[in-house]
Image (cartoon, rainbow, N blue to C red):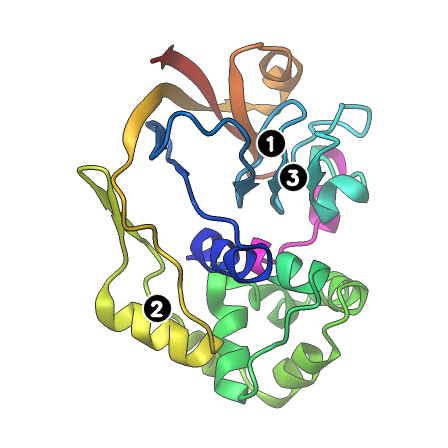
Amino acid sequence: MDSQASVSILNQVFGYEQNCYADRNGFYMIDWNIEKHIGVDLALHGDRMCYDNHVTMSTRNDKVNPNSANINAIYKISQDNYTQKCAFSTLLQVMSLLDYPLPKTDEGKAFLLSIDSAYLGYYSDRFKDMWLYYMEKLGYTELIDLVKKYSKNDIASTKIDERLTFENGILTFDKEKKEYAERLLEYEIYLPQQKFTERATFQSNYAQKQNGSEILNNNMLFSLAMTSAKNISYSVYSTIH
């Protein structure tokens, strides 16, 4: 949901059409003749363009993707200072970057914060100050006012199962959940109607921090994200068609 809602905004603002889809199993394309792509909510390795909000450095000295619009990369957040990360959704970052309007209703704003559990930091004594710091950085004073007004359970009550379905090359989202999300976000969730076909397969795995440099130097690395101060999630190419 985080990725697809972000894609929907990029479609509205720039007219970008989705031509690819990636999961931990592989990479799929509609039109194989299109060569230029932008990853969304996807921490692409190297210098490929992407919007994402993941921590992608094991140490402060690691190289970051220079074509990634990622506040955590800008502020040099790594596994060494992991608790200082911006733990919001990619969607909130894209909306801030493009000055895209927030939903008008409190329910809509609460639902926006529920996506990827972006609200949780405020309700934690350990992370509250950091949450407020990044909200100020992204210009979301309205969302700060909202969480001061409502409880954690109030925000959580707007949350839905955010998983999309990808079967037989078709990307879908439950009709009722899609309509609910569209009503609260106040825009249409974009879904391509064409069929994707497999372009590459991945070997996806988890590793420990001490293996970070080895993984980052793998020339077959597709994407990588630090999922905690100690753990790494990554995908490497297995086959390319």
**Label 3 sits on what residue type?**
Val
- Position in image of residue 59 (x %, y %): 75, 27
Which range is magenta? Answer: 80-91
Magenta region includes residue 36: no
- The crowd level at tag 3 (other Cα within 10 Å; few <14, some 14-19, many 20+) is many
Task: Give the labeled residue for mark 1.
Answer: 230
Looking at the image, is mark 3 or mark 1 earlier in the sequence? 3
Residue 215 sits in quarter: top right
Task: Look at the image and tell me in which quarter the N terminus lies.
Answer: bottom left
Residue 207 circle label? none
Tell which circle, 2 or 1, labels the residue nearer the N-terminal end: 2
198 left or right of 131 in image? left
Question: Could you tell me how far apart the alpha carbons at marks 2 and 3 are, in whole angstroms?
Answer: 25 Å
Q: Which residue is mark 3?
A: 55
**Going 34% across and 76% down the picture, which residue do you hit?**
180
Asked if one can make out residue 213 in the rendered structure from this viewpoint, the answer is: yes
Which is nearer the eye, 1 or 204? 1
Indicate yes or no whether the magenta region holds residue 88.
Answer: yes
**Quick one: label 2 or label 3, which is nearer the N terminus?**
3
Q: CA distance from mark 3 to mark 1?
A: 12 Å
- Residue nearest the observer in this picture, 231 or 89: 89
Q: Amino acid at mark 1?
A: Lys
